[in-house]
Image: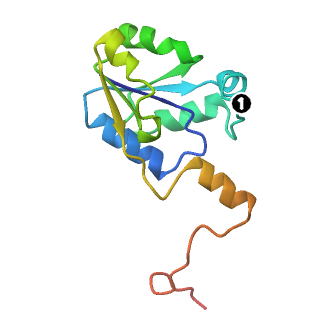
Amino acid sequence: RIITYGTFDMLHYGHINLLRRAKKMGDYLIVALSTDEFNWNSKHKKTYFTYDKRKQLLEAIRYVDLVIPEKNWDQKVNDMKLYQIDTFVMGDDWTGKFDYLSEKTGIKVVYLPRTPEISTTQIKKDLNSRKPVLKHDSSTSKRER
């Protein structure tokens, strides 16, 4: 049983890569999805999509077996016990931050490399600057006249 945590706002292929790799580590993948209140009150960030919409998107992904709410930073130890977790997975931008879970619960903690060229932060920055993100390759797509 695997668990990962996150906001998963503006879902993109980096998120899918993380979920796919996490699912390969076990039989059952749980995603603890940050609630709107937790994001605003503790992380000081506003999401584009509401919790319910983000949950709906995650539930549609074949790698995800269960989505639960993440309401605070401190629920992780209880989640490990409640859901009988074997492995905790996060992106490597969190390296070292959750090592305590291994000591407190005995679970394996794994930090997966991020997909380097994509992030929600980068998408928001590109959209705010109106910078074109996709490059058009005329050799792969021809417009009919």
The quarter of the picture where residue 52 lies is top right
The quarter of the picture where residue 54 lies is top right
| Viewer-side residue, 70 vs 100 | 100
Colour option used:
rainbow
Tell me the residue at 59%/16% (across/down): 72
| Residue 80 appears in the rendering | yes
**Looking at the picture, how far across and down is residue 35, in whole percent?**
62, 24
Q: Residue furthest bottom?
A: 145
Left or right: 15, with 144 as reference point: left
The quarter of the picture where residue 26 lies is top left
**Looking at the picture, how far across and down is residue 100, in whole percent?**
39, 17
Q: Amino acid at mark 1?
A: His
Image height check: is 83 above or below 136? above
Q: Residues within 10 Å of mark 1 (few under 14, many from 20)?
A: few
Tell me the residue at 54%/27% (across/down): 33
Left or right: 39, with 88 as reference point: right
- Check disc 1 and report the residue beneath it: 44
